[in-house]
Amino acid sequence: MDRAVTISQVAALAGVSTGTASKALNGRGALRPETRLRVQQAAEQLGFVANAAARSLQTGRTYTVGMITTDSIGRFSIPLLIGAEDALGAGQMSVFLCDARDDPIREQYYLRTLLSRKVDGIIVTGRRTQARQPIGRDLPVPVVYAFISSADGRDCSVVPDEADGARRAIQHLLAVGRRRIAHVTGPEHHHSAQMRAAGAVDTLAAEGLHLATPVLYGEWSEAWGRQAAGILLSTGADVDAVFCGSDQVARGLAEGLRDAGREIPRDIALVGFDNWDVMVDGSRPALTSVDMDLEGIGRTAAEMLLAAINGEPVHGHQARPCRLVPRASTAV
């Protein structure tokens, strides 16, 4: 019978000490990325499999993390989970995903369950970026909020910089020669709608410009986008571009404009927000959109949770920049 590969053999192949190899594989310590990668590659080459029970006894950790979400359809939580698993996988940690379904009682049940399983930390996420009350006080494990944020500024919250995303959208439209820009978005009370609208207004103001019409607030739906197209055209405003607060709204708007005989982007250029593949690829033409890098948010949240588990917590809001993905809806 072949004998199991030991961590000493991994260390020897990677050219590091056994202690360094252990830290690299367990996600601990302040190691250089190239050192951590070299150890991981050595472990893969030798087929090293860590003994989870032995690791737990040695470190007092379970090498598991809980993720509690209110996003039951997975639109935001699945990309976040993928990003978190990318970061946690380096330390061979597993993730328990719990769907609270916007039910506070269910959420507290999952919190108690995860704590009873002795998870090393918890990531809290949801389908909205606005602040929520902390999931608990004086918990025995660190908690990081991802996409959603905590109302307690002492907590660590990793969020997309939505104002930055709006700025990139407006600057792109200005760069392709558009000056008479309208903004169509979701409900006025919604945090994301407010942030994206404010970002658009501020960016135009910095260029000595203003929106061609007042912000059109409605719903996060294609139906609202089609309705908004009719409203925009009925005002007689000489609009040459529209920045939409979501891809769903933008896709509906594109359909409404096309039905009214307007050509995109020749007559009106169009930018969405979210970079949701189902929407941007299904739109005619393909939709330029702002990407919040949900996987990147998940990775950053997991890295900060690992730091907190290792005794180096980060506090406050950590805003990550967005990126703009140009497509045919704004092609010159």
Image (cartoon, rainbow, N blue to C red):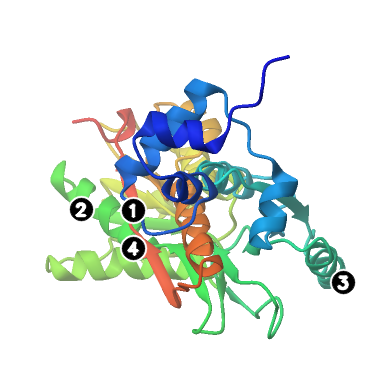
Disc 3 element = helix
Label 4 and label 2: CA atoms lie apart by 18 Å
Disc 2 element = helix
Disc 1 element = loop
Residue placed under numbered mark 2 in the picture: 171
Q: Residue furthest top?
A: 1
Nearer the observer, disc 1 or disc 4? 4
Q: In this orientation, which residue lies closer to the viewer: 74 or 185?
A: 74
Q: Tell me which label, 1 or 4, sits earlier in the chain.
A: 4
Would you place residue 195 above or below residue 186 in this image? Answer: below
Residue placed under numbered mark 4 in the picture: 213
Q: Tell me which label, 2 or 3, sits earlier in the chain.
A: 3
Nearer the observer, disc 1 or disc 3? 3
Q: Tell me which label, 4 or 3, sits earlier in the chain.
A: 3
Q: Tell me which label, 4 or 2, sits earlier in the chain.
A: 2
Amino acid type indicated by mark 2: Gln
Label 4 and label 3: CA atoms lie apart by 44 Å
Task: Rate crowding at label 3 as few (under 14), some (14 to 19) or many (20 or more) other CA atoms within 10 Å.
Answer: few
Query: Is residue 20 visible from the viewing direction of this image?
Result: yes
What quarter of the picture does the C terminus occupy?
top left
Residue placed under numbered mark 3 in the picture: 105
Q: Are discs 2 and 1 less than 8 Å apart at CB?
A: no
Q: In this orientation, which residue lies closer to the viewer: 24 or 270?
A: 24
Side (left or right) of 107 relative to 128:
right
Residue placed under numbered mark 1 in the picture: 236
